[in-house]
Image (cartoon, grey):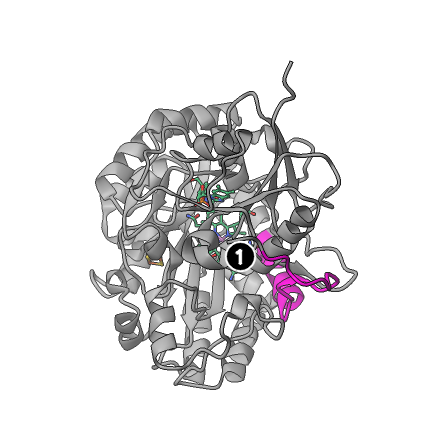
Amino acid sequence: MAKPFRLTLIHPCIGRREGEKYIRLWQMEPLPPAVIAALTPKDVEVRFYDDRLEQVAYDEPTDLVAISIETYTAKRAYQIASEYRSRGIPVVLGGFHATLCPDEAARYAESVVIGEAERIWESVIDDYRHGTPKKFYQDLSRPTLERSTPDRRIFQGKNYLPMRLVESGRGCPLKCDFCAIQTVYQRSQTRRPTEDILRELRAIGAKGKLVFFVDDNVISNPRLAKEFFRELIPLKIRWVSQGTINAGYDEELLELMRRSGCQGILVGFESLDPSNLRSMEKAVNTSGAGYEQALANLHRYGIRIYGSFVFGYDHDTPRSFDNAVAFARRHGFWLTGFAHLTPFPGTPLYQRLEQQGKLLYRNWWLDDAYSYNHIPFQPSCMSPQEIHDHCIRARKAYYSWPSIVERAFHPVNRTDLKMLASYFMMNAMHRKDHGLRDSYPLGDRSWRKPLLEAAR
Ligand code: B12
Ligand code: SF4
C-alpha cells in the first residue's frame, strides 16, 4: 500500500522576546488552518502546530508544510519556513500577507497561494503528490463558501479561549483606505450558505455559548443579514461580531439582532473628526443621523459596543485622544481599541504614504528595527513617538480601574450577570495587554540564522 501523503499546517505567532514564551492572552481557535484542513483530501494525514502555544516539531517527518501568514506574522512565518526548507521539506504560504505581497512570500517558499483557497487547494496537494508543484496558485474570482466549514479536529488537545469562532460571510463592500480587507476581497462580500452555518453551530454545541462571527462586516448587506438573523433565533446562541455604525439606524435589523442573541458588535468609529473620516473614505460614518442617535438605538436593543479608533490622520491632535477616551467612557463602551494607523501593504493608504515618501521603513514588517506599536510612517499631525505615547496613554486611561468600574454601571453592561463577568475578564485582559505587547518583536529574536531563500 502507498504511504499516505503527510501535510503539516502551521499558525505562526507574531514573534518572541529572546528566551521567553509567547504572550498567552488572546489565543482563539485559528480558522484559516481549519478551513485548509477541511479542503484537504481525506486520504492526506494532517497535523497542526499553533506556534503561539507550542513548539513546532521541525524534525517530525512530513511531505509538505502549509503556513498561513498575516503581515504581523510574516517574519516569523519565514523563519519557520526556513527551518523546514533547510531540512528539505517544501513549504506553501497562503493567507492575507501572501496575497498582498506574493513576490516577497515567494522568496521564502516553494509555492504561494494568492487569495482564497476553496477552489485551488486540492490542486496544490495533487501537484505536490505528483512532484509537479507550481510557484504561484491563484483564484482570480471569488469562490462560493460551500466547502468552508472548518475541520475542528485539528484543535484537539489545544487550550484555546472558550469563545467559538464562526464565519458567516467574508469580505466587505466598503473602501476604507487603511483596510487590507478591501484590497484582498476587492470590495466584495460572499456569504456561506445559512444551512452550513446553522449545522456548524449545532455541531460545536453553540447553544447558550458565546459565538464570535468573524465577518468583517456582518450587517453590510442588511437584507441578507436580516434573513440570517431570523434563522438564528431558534438556536438560542449569544453572539458578537463586527459591523458598521449604520446598523444603529435600522430598527428592524436591531430587533432581529437582539432576538438572534447579539450581545455586542465591534464598530470602527476610527475618528471623531469628519475631515479625517473623509480622507480615509469612511463615508458610512458621516451618513445617517449621527453617532449619538445610532448608539442610543444600539443600546436600547441591548447591543454592547467595542469601539475602535485609529490615530495618525492629518487632522489629529493630542486632544483627539482625550476626546475619544471621553466619548467611549460617556457611552459606556464594553471595550475600545486605540490604535495607531498602520500602513498595510497593498492598501490605498500604503500607496499614498509611499508616493509621499512618508514610509519610515522599506518593509516595516521585516525590519529588525521595527517592533509592535511603533509607527512606521511620518504622520503630518504629530511625531511618530507622540502618536505612540498618546495611544498608550489613552489605553491606560480607558482601562484604568475607575473607568472599568464606571463603565460596568452603564445600563447596557449591567443587564446580564454572565456578560458582566465576561466584561470584567475582557477589560482586565486589555489592561494587561497594552503593557505586554508594547515594542514586542516581530519574528523570534532568538532565531539568528539568515532566512533561507527559495529558487525562483
Ligand atoms: C478573528 C480575527 C482576529 C482574532 C484572532 C483569532 C485567533 N484565531 O486567535 C483577534 C481578534 C485576536 C485578532 C487579532 C489581530 N488581528 Co485579526 N482578524 C481576525 C479576522 C476578523 C478573522 C480571521 C479569520 O478567522 N478568517 C477566516 C479565514 C477562514 O479566512 P482567511 O484567513 O481569509 O483564509 C482564507 C484565505 O486567506 C486563504 N488562506 C489563509 N491562510 C492560508 C494558508 C495557506 C497555506 C493557504 C493555501 C491559504 C490560506 O484560504 C482561506 C480560505 O479561503 C480577520 C479578518 C478576516 N476576515 O479574515 C482579521 C485580520 C486577519 N486581523 C488583522 C490584524 C491586523 C490583527 C492584529 C495585528 C490587530 C492588532 N493591531 O493587534 C491582531 C494580531 C493578530 C495576530 N496574528 O496575532 C488583519 C490582518 C491584515 C494583514 N495585512 O495581515 C485582518 C485581515 C483584519 C483587517 N481588517 O485587516 N484578529
Ligand atoms: S468597514 Fe471595516 S472591513 Fe469594511 S472596508 Fe472599512 S474597515 Fe475594512
Residue 293 in the image: above or below residue 212: below
Based on the displayed image, in which of its 4 quarters is residue 269 positioned?
bottom left
| Residue at image coords 24%, 43% | 222
Compared across the picture, whether 174 is left or right of 184 comes to left
The kind of secondary structure element at disc 1 is loop
Q: Residue at x 65, y 53 (%)?
A: 82
Quarter of the image where the N terminus is located: top right
Q: Among all residues in the image, which is located at the extreme top?
A: 1
Q: Position of residue 422 (x, y in %)?
A: 57, 47
Q: Report the span colored magenta.
A: 426-453
Q: Residue drawn 39% across and 26% down?
A: 196
Q: Position of residue 63 (x, y in %)?
A: 63, 34
Q: Is residue 178 above or below residue 66?
A: below
- Give the vertical position of 236 relative to 322 (above or below): above
Membership of 256 in magenta stretch: no
Q: Is residue 227 left or right of residue 61?
A: left
The residue labelled by disc 1 is 107
Q: Position of residue 176 (x, y in %)?
A: 31, 62
Q: Residue at x 57, y 40 (%)?
A: 29
Residue 390, horizontal then vertical, whole percent = 52, 79
**How many other residues sit within 10 Å of disc 1, few (<14), some (14-19) or many (≥20)?**
some
Q: Is residue 444 magenta?
A: yes
The answer to whether 27 appears left or right of 69 in the picture is: right
Viewer-proximal residue among 38 and 373: 38
Q: Considering depth in this image, is 186 or 391 the residue closer to the camera?
A: 186
Q: Quadrant of residue 435?
A: bottom right
Instruction: Examine the rendered structure and indicate whether residue 432 appears above or below residue 129.
Output: below
Q: Is residue 237 visible?
A: no
Q: Is mark 1 within 8 Å of ligand 1?
A: no
Residue type at mark 1 is: Arg
Q: How many marks?
A: 1
Q: Residue 175, can we see it? A: yes
